[in-house]
Amino acid sequence: MLTDADVPGVWQRLGLPGILDVHVHFMPDPVMRKVWAYFDDVAHYGRPWPITYREGEADRLERLRELGVARFPSLLYPHKPDMAAWLNDWAAGFAAEVPQVWRTFTFFPEPTAVDYVTAALDGGAQIAKAHLQVGGYDPREPLLDEVWGRCADAGVPVVTHCGDGPVPGTFTGVGPIGEVLQRHPSLTLVVAHLGMPRYGEFLDLAERYDRVHLDTTMAFTDFVEAGSPFPPADRSRLLDLGDRIVFGSDFPNIPHPYAHQLEAVLRLDLGDAWLRDVLWHNASRLLPVGQ
Ligand SMILES: [Zn+2]
């Protein structure tokens, strides 16, 4: 079993400068505490979801440094109106303080969305998060059409929780986000969690649109394999789409050590070249990696 102390040895063996992790959460403290309380309530996911890295912000940053996670975002997302602009301001401040952080932004279907998204992009925001299950909104919502368009034009990756796992939302699944892609085929969509549990349908989407990527977050781990196993028949498609899979962990809100996510990807046994792409090169084409 791989431990966190073994993680640097993995990327060093591959000759990489570290790991690029596109799916990491940092949030204002009160928001993070609410997220943790949500995970603590067994009713939400039907089984315990113990958070491994329930620590102060400085400790969490230090963990990532020790693991060798060279760059990461501070993904955050609103569950109601009048929240996204405030989260974006916080994320800008956080990125200014922590050089390893990709400046992150988010949005919600509301009349002010185009303005604050434009402001974020003009200010240098690099990566967005959209959470269709927690946000409970329809991505086809007309108030978001221009937002998707701006993101597509800017070429920023939009990490989107659009799959039905761990619990479906009204607008999750490949249908609604697929229609967004029909309107904005150049959108750099990063399907969070590899679209679990309907992995195949989201791999189809990546085959159809060459700017669609998928992140590994929680996929292939013991926790997820127990309930939503990745279909062995689709394994070769991970190799075929090897330039579109990006490493993500969901740190710190994970029910296992960071090393287990890495181990889960390693044990797919898809080869070192594939690993180098997934752990570094693919994300490095979407986001800046200079120090
Ligand atoms: Zn997440």
Image (cartoon, rainbow, N blue to C red):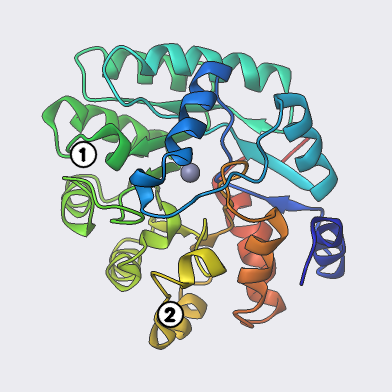
Most foreground residue, 91 or 163: 163
In the rendered image, the quadrant that contains the C terminus is top right
Residue type, numbered disc 1: Pro
Read off the residue under disc 1: 139
Crowdedness near tag 1: few (<14), some (14–19) or many (≥20) residues, C-alpha within 10 Å: many
Give the image location of residue 4, x and y in percent: 80, 56
State whether label 2 is within 8 Å of ligand 1. Answer: no
Residue visible at 47% across and 72% down in the picture? 225
Chain-order first, disc 1 or disc 2: 1
Residue 11, can we see it?
A: yes
Give above or below for 123 relative to 129: above
Identify the residue at horizontal 16%, vertical 56% (top origin): 175
- Identify residue type, mark 2: Arg
Residue at numbered disc 2: 237
Residue plotted at (72% across, 60% down)? 259
Left or right: 175 with respect to 81?
left
Callout 1 secondary element: loop
Residue 15 sits in which quadrant? bottom right
Residue 221: image x %, image y %? 56, 67
